[in-house]
Image (cartoon, grey):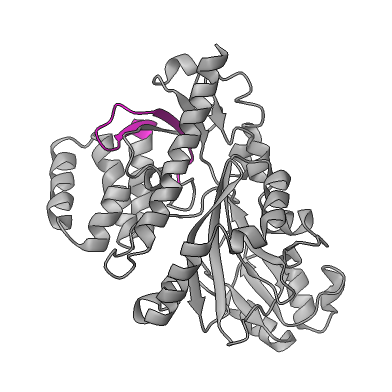
């Protein structure tokens, strides 16, 4: 996936690779590997629905796929996946860039196959992220890896399933160091009642306008809006037909200069690593809409954050990070976060499937390759350490 994504980003050899995959499928419609790669390219170029359609066709033919990183011959990793787009699973291909790992993807639609029916591996990884689509599968995987013959990273499916927006908010409600905006699920009919005049705090105590709302199951800001009053809520419902939504208190986390800063941080065996920091004039911050490419000042600020992260932001929020790792009890997870006006760690979301990558232009972002290499090296070392621990015990 990382190699194909870089082709799309840089535009080099894309046509030749695309044509080659089409030729393979034309010659052999049962070429599952070509179908899966083509589905990835379609998603990367904006044709998500067609890409997922081809992915489903590939998975009907075959459920396991091997990808070799670097020269191969390194750690053998078996990843348990779910069908879906790039946000459905931990982005292992990106995290393994620069390694010589052999990655086998096993797409599940129920209980995992018996270990004897799967390729040899040194370590396994439960890569399925939390979502409405994955909830039934994760529920069925509870306890499935307790007797697995190899170590399984993020093995407890129920802990991943608990990373819902409202679940995370409830877990850290009234925490002195971690601030998760109060969040709840709301049926459409309940929101229609609020739009017609019912009190908003019926959802949870103290909730008042402005609020933010998003359809349940949406990602990357799709359908996410700030609503200042009941009239704005009514207008929002008129253009969003979904039956259920997340509703959260709006938190103004702008700095003294009026800019909003949001960080993506991932934790590997409890150790935090910064993936990026976006600086934006808009409260709904995504790296792609923050205009980082157009602002040297924003890039300089991100570079400074990355250079000083360990002795600055991470040290300042060390106790909050400890609370997160102890609360989630996962070997690997990520958060989108900021700092609240009172200095607490403001957590918007947590999941195991947040995209982290080294795809940004090294000419424009020369500070990113070292930071991402540090993260990727630590990730591979953690998996290697899990595998070695079992060998030493044996």
Which region shows up in magenta?
60-84
At a point 83% along the width and 62% down the height, the residue shown is: 174
Q: Quadrant of residue 48?
A: bottom left
Q: How many marks?
A: 0
Residue located at (63% from left, 84% from top): 235
Closer-to-camera residue (341/353): 341
Q: Identify the residue at the far top of this view.
A: 394
Residue nearest the observer in this picture, 12 or 44: 12
Does the magenta run of residues contain 83? yes
Question: 375 left or right of 266?
Answer: left
Q: Is residue 259 above or below residue 180?
A: below
Q: Is residue 219 visible in this depiction of the protein?
A: no
- Image: 36 above or below 186: above
Residue lying at 48% horizontally and 26% vertically, measured from the top left: 123
Residue 195, x across and y down, in percent = 75, 82
Q: Position of residue 216 (x, y in %)?
A: 62, 61
Q: Is residue 262 above or below residue 39?
A: below
Percent position (x, y) of residue 96?
38, 42
Q: Residue at x 44, y 78 (%)?
A: 298
Q: Position of residue 369 (x, y in %)?
A: 35, 57
Q: Quadrant of residue 21?
A: top left
Q: Is residue 284 left or right of residue 2?
A: right
Position of 48 compared to 340: left or right?
Answer: left
Magenta-span inclusion, residue 320: no
Q: Quadrant of the C terminus?
A: top right
Residue 213 visible in this rendered orientation of the protein = yes
Query: Which residue is nearer to you in this view: 289 or 271?
Result: 271
């Amino acid at each position: 996936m990382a190699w194909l994504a870089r082709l799309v980003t840089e535009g080099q050899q894309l046509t030749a690779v695309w044509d080659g995959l089409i030729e393979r499928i034309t010659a052999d419609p049962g070429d599952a590997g070509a179908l899966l790669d083509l589905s990835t390219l379609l998603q990367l170029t904006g044709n998500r629905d067609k890409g997922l359609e081809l992915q489903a066709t590939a998975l009907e033919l075959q459920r396991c796929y091997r990808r070799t990183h670097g020269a191969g011959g390194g750690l053998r990793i078996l990843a348990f996946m779910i069908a879906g787009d790039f946000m459905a699973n931990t982005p292992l291909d990106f995290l393994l860039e620069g390694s010589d790992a052999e990655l086998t993807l096993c797409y599940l639609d129920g209980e995992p196959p018996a270990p004897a029916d799967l390729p040899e591996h040194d370590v396994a990884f439960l890569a399925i992220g939390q979502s409405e689509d994955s909830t039934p599968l994760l529920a069925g995987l509870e306890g499935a890896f307790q007797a697995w013959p190899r170590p399984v990273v993020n093995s407890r499916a129920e802990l991943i399933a608990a990373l819902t927006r409202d679940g995370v908010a409830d877990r850290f409600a009234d925490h002195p160091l971690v601030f998760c905006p109060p969040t709840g699920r709301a049926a459409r009919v309940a929101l229609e009642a609020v739009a017609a005049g019912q009190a908003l705090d019926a959802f949870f105590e103290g909730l008042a306008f402005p609020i933010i709302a998003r359809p349940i199951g949406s990602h990357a800001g799709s359908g996410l809006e700030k609503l200042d009053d009941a009239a704005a809520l009514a207008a929002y419902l008129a253009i969003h037909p979904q039956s259920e939504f997340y509703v959260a208190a709006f938190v103004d986390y702008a700095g003294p200069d009026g800019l909003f800063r949001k960080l993506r941080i991932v934790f590997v065996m409890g150790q935090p690593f910064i993936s990026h920091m976006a600086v934006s004039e808009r409260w709904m911050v995504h790296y792609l809409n923050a205009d980082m490419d157009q602002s040297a000042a924003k890039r300089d600020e991100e570079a400074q954050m990355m250079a000083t992260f360990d002795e600055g932001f991470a040290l300042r929020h060390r106790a909050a990070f400890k609370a997160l790792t102890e609360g989630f009890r996962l070997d690997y997870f990520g958060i989108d976060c900021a700092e609240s006006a009172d200095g607490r760690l403001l957590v918007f979301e947590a999941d195991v499937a947040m995209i982290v990558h080294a795809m940004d232009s090294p000419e424009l972002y020369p500070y990113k390759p070292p930071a991402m290499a540090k993260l990727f090296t630590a990730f591979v070392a953690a998996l290697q350490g899990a595998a070695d621990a079992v060998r030493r015990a044996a």
